[in-house]
Amino acid sequence: TTATPTSTPNYTIPSPSPVPSADTEPPVFQYIGGPPDGGSMTFTTFCIPMYLIDNVSQIATGLKVRYVFDGADLGDWKQDFSPCYSNVSEGVHTFSVQGTDGSGNVTSVFSKSFTIQSLVTSPSPSPSGT
């Protein structure tokens, strides 16, 4: 005897998952600390912490920055998000930074300038009565 189906099975075939679109958006600097742009300070040692976010990449998967302090060449891409500087001389200084994600999308260069001023102290008063 030949078997004949008594009913057609009702299978639901799931739709394929959408293919993720290519990452075309650059990351965004959510925070860049350190001396304020256009400001002045007397500290000669400081760090410039940064927080870079992306719609796809995480730090472990490709977010990187390159930066320069008082120069023109931004240097190599790295995952150092808080460069520190010490013994910075008096005068006007500029810090510039750029970020990238794992897909190669690059931010615009962000720059800020600030002034390091010497700490001026008042002369000691001369002893009275002399």
Image (tube, rainbow, N blue to C red):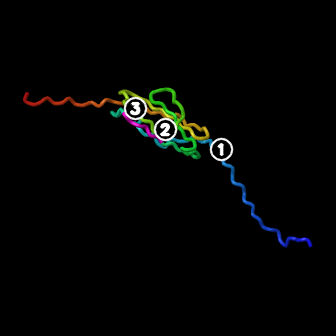
Looking at the rendered structure, the secondary structure element under dot 3 is strand
Rendered image quadrant of residue 45: top left
Residue furthest out toward the front = 1
Q: CA distance from mark 2 to mark 3?
A: 22 Å
Q: At x 46% / y 42%, what residue is drawn?
A: 31
- What is the span of residues highlighted in magenta in the rendered image? 45-50
Would you name the residue on which mark 2 appears?
A: 80
Pick the quarter of the image with the N terminus.
bottom right
Would you name the residue on which mark 3 appears?
A: 114
The answer to which of 111 and 73 lies nearer the viewer is 73
Amino acid beneath label 3: Phe
Q: At x 66% / y 46%, what residue is drawn?
A: 21
Precedes in sequence: disc 2 or disc 3: 2
Amino acid beneath label 1: Ala
Precedes in sequence: disc 1 or disc 3: 1
Q: CA distance from mark 1 to mark 3?
A: 39 Å
Percent of width and height locating residue 38: 40, 33
Q: Is residue 5 above or below residue 99?
A: below
Percent of width and height locating residue 76: 54, 32
Percent of width and height locating residue 52: 51, 42
Q: Is residue 90 left or right of residue 56?
A: left
In the image, residue 9 lies in the stretch drawn in magenta: no
Foreground disc of the pair 2, 1: 2
Would you name the residue on which mark 1 appears?
A: 22
Marks 2/1 in contact by CB < 8 Å: the verdict is: no
Looking at the rendered structure, the secondary structure element under dot 2 is loop
